[in-house]
Amino acid sequence: MKEYKIQLIPLKLNHLSTLAKWRNKDRIKNTMFNDNKITLFTTIMWHISNIRNANSQYFIIQDIDDNNLIGLIGLTNINFYNKTSELDIYIGEDNYLHKGLASDAFLQLKDYAKINLGLNRIKAYLFANNTIAFRFYNKLGFRVEGTLRNEILKNSEFKDIQIMAYKL
Ligand SMILES: CC(C)(COP(=O)(O)OP(=O)(O)OC[C@H]1O[C@@H](n2cnc3c(N)ncnc32)[C@H](O)[C@@H]1OP(=O)(O)O)[C@@H](O)C(=O)NCCC(=O)NCCS
């Protein structure tokens, strides 16, 4: 069986159509807080605002052997004073799921966050019913810090959000 190895490369304009395609998959869309329709245009606007705002840094998760694009990982709402950040992550290509690649991507990103950005904590906000994400974060060493009740309006329903955090 192929052993996948991944690398993180900074998100660029030429990745955005792939990103918009991934982001509109039900499997991914259902886990995201933003309910708006994602188009290539809104993805470009989002990317431009991230470039202007030094507080978000996104990376494509790429197969090191064949350069296939696998998913997205990013630090967002970086607070350099308090040394905190939030994590965004998804595997876009279904055939790369549950092969340890998102875990590898996080392990690479956390070293970057600690060594290059000097951060101290990374937080994850997830829907309380996202059991796959809960298991994923829990296995990586994130711990539950609390629940925000009825915090996000998703598909016309108020949903609970769980906050988990990782000490770097
Ligand atoms: C959460 C997500 C990023 C995990 O990616 P992945 O590369 O498949 O995860 P890994 O292979 O590194 O798995 C690590 C652990 O996560 C958990 N996990 C991953 N997929 C799982 C599944 N389908 N069912 C149950 N647990 C799962 C397991 O604990 C797993 O450890 P194990 O291999 O010993 O069982 C991926 O499922 C995804 O893209 N989900 C949609 C977006 C999302 O929910 N993002 C996070 C919240 S915003």
Image (cartoon, rainbow, N blue to C red):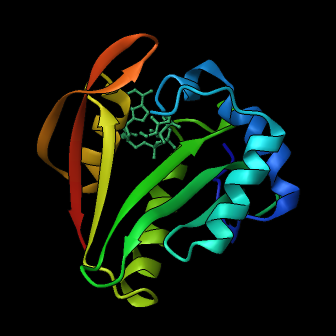
Q: Is residue 38 left or right of residue 152?
A: right
Which x, y percent locates residue 119? 32, 81
Side of 69 relative to 132 (left or right) = right
- Of residue 39 and residue 108, the one placed in the foreground of this image is 39
Pick out the residue farthest to the top. 156
The quadrant of the rendering that contains the C terminus is bottom left
- Observer-nearest of 98 and 134: 134
Query: Which residue is at a point 79% across and 62% down the rendered structure image?
Result: 65
Asked if 21 appears above or below 111 in the picture, the reply is above
Ligand 1 positioned in quadrant: top left
Quadrant of res 153 = top left
Identified at 71% across, 58% down, the residue is: 47
Q: Is residue 36 shown above or below 47?
A: above
Q: Residue at x 24, y 79 (%)?
A: 82
Residue 6 visible in the displayed image? no
Instruction: From the viewer's side, name the closer residue of 70 and 74.
Output: 74
Residue 55 in sight here: yes
Query: For the point 47% across and 51% down, which residue is it?
Result: 88
Residue 97, by quadrant, is: top right
User: In the image, residue 100 lies at what x, y percent?
Assistant: 49, 48
- Would you identify the image quadrant in which residue 15 lies? bottom right
How many marks the image carries: the answer is 0
